[in-house]
Image (cartoon, rainbow, N blue to C red):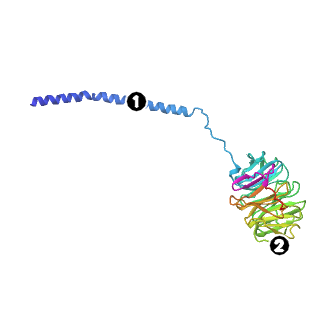
Amino acid sequence: MNQQSTIIHNESATRTAQRQPPSGLRSTDSGRHRVWGGLAMALLVAVGTVVSFLPRPSPHFPATSIQPQRMLINGATQVDGQMIAAGELGHLFFSVDACKSWQDATVEPQRGSTLTRVFFVNPLLGFAVGHDNWILRTEDGGKTWQEANFMGETSEVLLDIWGHAKGPLFAVGSFGRFLTSTDQGKSWAPHDTGLGDRHLYALSGAGETHLMLVGESGLVARSSDQGATWTRLPEFYKGSFFGLIALSPDTWLVYGMRGKVYRTQDFGLTWKELDSGTTAALYGGTLTREGNVVLVGEGGVVTVSEDHGQTFRRTHAGGGQSLSSVSEASDGKLIFVGPAGITQQAQQPEPRKAVE
């Protein structure tokens, strides 16, 4: 019995010894594995290092494009067959194909301040104004712009600009800011109008000497000496006026809050209130080549006069994005601008039919 047990035990030990190699052989194989693993890792690192320094093509990204149809545009004007638009982040755009496509103009230096208005005195010489008393000047019709004035520390806004190519130029804005230039807009200096510190929203002129400006809280002022002196007119409305249109040296329209529109035929001595067809605020307007007056404003409202600003009819009731300005393109279509960018009207409003 004891002998049999001993035999079974020895056979089990023999089978165990056959399954496991000697301890010396196990150590040698493990060392070889570690050596080969280290060599493989070193090779991978070396290959990765070499590959990282090899020349390879840059990844393809689409060219960045600024689309004025999708950004805030405050002002636009048509000059010599092309449209110029000014908007946020210091961008100025021009279109030479009736607003089908737009190109970003060169602005030097690019301050990034929002632009509010653009104005040309002839097909080549133009100006744009905006926040931080920024004034830009172009001599090539709007393709390149250079800085003529900037006062970033003031945080004031210039809201409009007007003038003659050979005569004085004027820029107006917040808190009564009034700047003048007598060297074709190359340099600018402040001018005391005596009108106080109310915001000045718009300025325009007619003829050689007559100018008028409008502003906050019913402010209307006129000048008959090329802007050297200004006379504040008696208030006939307490709300702010945001724009004005000169129909002749004596005939003017002013418009603003609550759809208010007033007309004068004696250079501001007397005024007549008109029915604009809306109670929405009116922010911008234009006089078309056919003599129609188009006013736009809050909620996208559009109202039109086809009788030289004597009567108006609303052509769009609003209910959408507000419009800050309107201009006529070279093909006669109206171009609307505002917080939603640039939109284009298919055609001019149809004239009213006479009642038979």
Q: Can residue 177 be seen in this view?
A: no
355, 252: nearer the viewer: 355
Question: Mark 2 touching mark 1, by CB under 8 A?
Answer: no
Q: Which amino acid type is shown beneath numbered disc 1? A: Val
- Image spot of residue 303 (x, y percent): 77, 61
In this view, 124 is above or below 177: above
> For the view shown, which residue lies furthest in the left direction?
1
Q: Residue at x 42, y 32 (%)?
A: 38
Task: State the image quarter where residue 228 is shown.
Answer: bottom right
Residue interval drawn in magenta:
327-348
N-terminal-most mark, 2 or 1: 1
In this view, 38 is above or below 82: above
Quadrant where the C terminus lies?
bottom right
Whether residue 333 appears in magenta in the rendering, the answer is yes
Q: Give the number of the disc on residue 35.
A: 1
Task: Determine whether, in the image, residue 106 is placed left or right of residue 212.
Answer: left
Q: Is residue 31 visible?
A: yes
Task: State the image quarter where residue 51 is shown.
Answer: top right
Q: Residues within 10 Å of mark 2 (few under 14, many from 20)?
A: few
Q: How crowded is mark 1: few (under 14 residues within 10 Å), some or many (20 or more)?
A: few
Q: Which amino acid type is shown beneath numbered disc 2? A: Pro
- Image spot of residue 243 (x, y percent): 79, 62
Q: Which residue is drawn at 62% across and 38% down?
A: 60
Whether residue 193 appears in magenta in the rendering, the answer is no
112, 326: nearer the viewer: 326
Task: Determine whether, in the image, residue 129 is placed left or right of residue 266.
Answer: left
Q: Which residue is drawn at 78% across and 69% down?
A: 218
Q: Distance between the residues labelled 2 and 1?
A: 99 Å
For mark 2, give the secondary structure: loop
Task: State the image quarter where residue 253 is shown.
Answer: bottom right
230, 275: nearer the viewer: 275
Residue denoted by label 2: 234
